[in-house]
Amino acid sequence: MKRTTLITTTLSAAIIGGCASQPDITGALDEPEVVAVKQDPGKLVYWVKPGPRINLSEEVFGTPDNPKRGDVEAYVEKTDLGPIKQLLRDMPALVSAPEEARETNEAGTRYTAFNQPGPFGNNAQPLPMAEGSNGYLEARMVNNVEVDQPAGPFSAADELELETEFHDPDGNHYRIDMQTLVQPPIPGYDTGGGVVVDTELHGTTGIGTPLMPREYTHGAFWGFGDLYVNGEKQGTWMTHLMTTEIVRKNDYSLAIDEELPLPAEKRPISSQPHHTHLIMLPVEPYKPMPVLGPLLGLGPTAPRHAPVETAYELPNGETQPSSGK
């Protein structure tokens, strides 16, 4: 019997299985866990613009005298996979916040910001509430196993159904068609077979970027999805969705670990205890490696950093990227 949780959510931001057949399943659950998440059209959707991460958690990042999670090379050394080493150097925010990009208070005793623009800033724009102007989402995440499978990133044993369409503030239309679940081979990440349920992510967990606070997560997945903008396919990028406790305050600033859980009066919608984050990370599967890839533990392709191609124009006249740097 499956244990199913149904969540109606606020969105911020085909059946997919990791592998058609799994000859050897590691850590199979006695009963699959299912989380179903739904947001109907015409509900509240935020588009998050690039910005600095304001206010850094001392618990996660330490102090200028005792910094933590600032050296990406410490994580590079934990993998033998050349493409992953390069990916971490191109996108250090996957695992760290380099000290040279941190700001401090005048006394130099506390970190106040990480100044590289990214999706962790406080500049978010709510989209029009009219149906057809914002977005909708329906996801069904099935957790079959407790741990990542040993055969590599594309051996995920969990399952996913996702249907989502949304707009940016300029009215451009987006659709994501998921292609496969994946277990990102990032040092410290444990993605539980592609889907995780009833757990904590980010912050001090080591799973996901530390620039997001440690947050209780009802359900989350990692995979590769095709992005369509105004009906045209732009490419295929890493896609991450998670339905979590509320981590954005009523001014939509991003909380830090020490502020959670947020009391109802500090949430954007006081009566709602959870929201859903959807992001396409600037990571694409780019190089076919049908023979060498599996031998290296990467699967049939190797990932690389590549900005997500949107159609949203920023005030500087450039389209919004998602560089991750």
Image: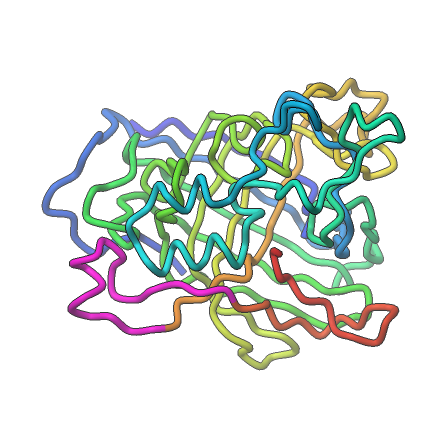
Please report the residue visible at 70 percent of the width from the left and 46 percent of the height from the top.
101
Q: Name, please, the residue furthest toward the left.
A: 23
Quadrant of the drawing holding the N terminus = top left
Please report the residue visible at 70 percent of the width from the left and 54 percent of the height from the top.
41
Classify residue 217 as left or right of residue 181.
Answer: right
Q: How many circles with numbers are drawn on the protein?
A: 0
Residue 206: image x %, image y %?
A: 48, 32
User: Residue 207 versus residue 172: which sits nearer the camera?
Assistant: 207
Q: Is residue 177 above or below residue 214?
A: below
The answer to whether residue 190 of the structure is visible from this angle is yes
Colouring mode (rainbow / by chain / secondary structure / one colour): rainbow
Please report the residue visible at 52 percent of the width from the left and 31 percent of the height from the top.
201
Residue 71: image x %, image y %?
A: 54, 40
Quadrant of the drawing holding the C terminus = bottom right
Q: Which residues are magenta?
A: 287-305
The answer to whether residue 42 of the structure is visible from this angle is no
Residue 198: image x %, image y %?
A: 47, 25
Whether 293 is among the magenta residues is yes
Residue 8: image x %, image y %?
A: 63, 37
**Quadrant housing residue 281:** bottom right
Please report the residue visible at 69 percent of the width from the left and 30 percent of the height from the top.
246
Classify residue 192 as left or right of residue 276.
Answer: left
User: Residue 325 versus residue 182: which sits nearer the camera?
Assistant: 325
User: Residue 138 versus residue 222: which sits nearer the camera?
Assistant: 222
Whether 54 is among the magenta residues is no
Q: Is residue 309 above or below residue 11?
A: below
Classify residue 97 as left or right of residue 161.
Answer: right
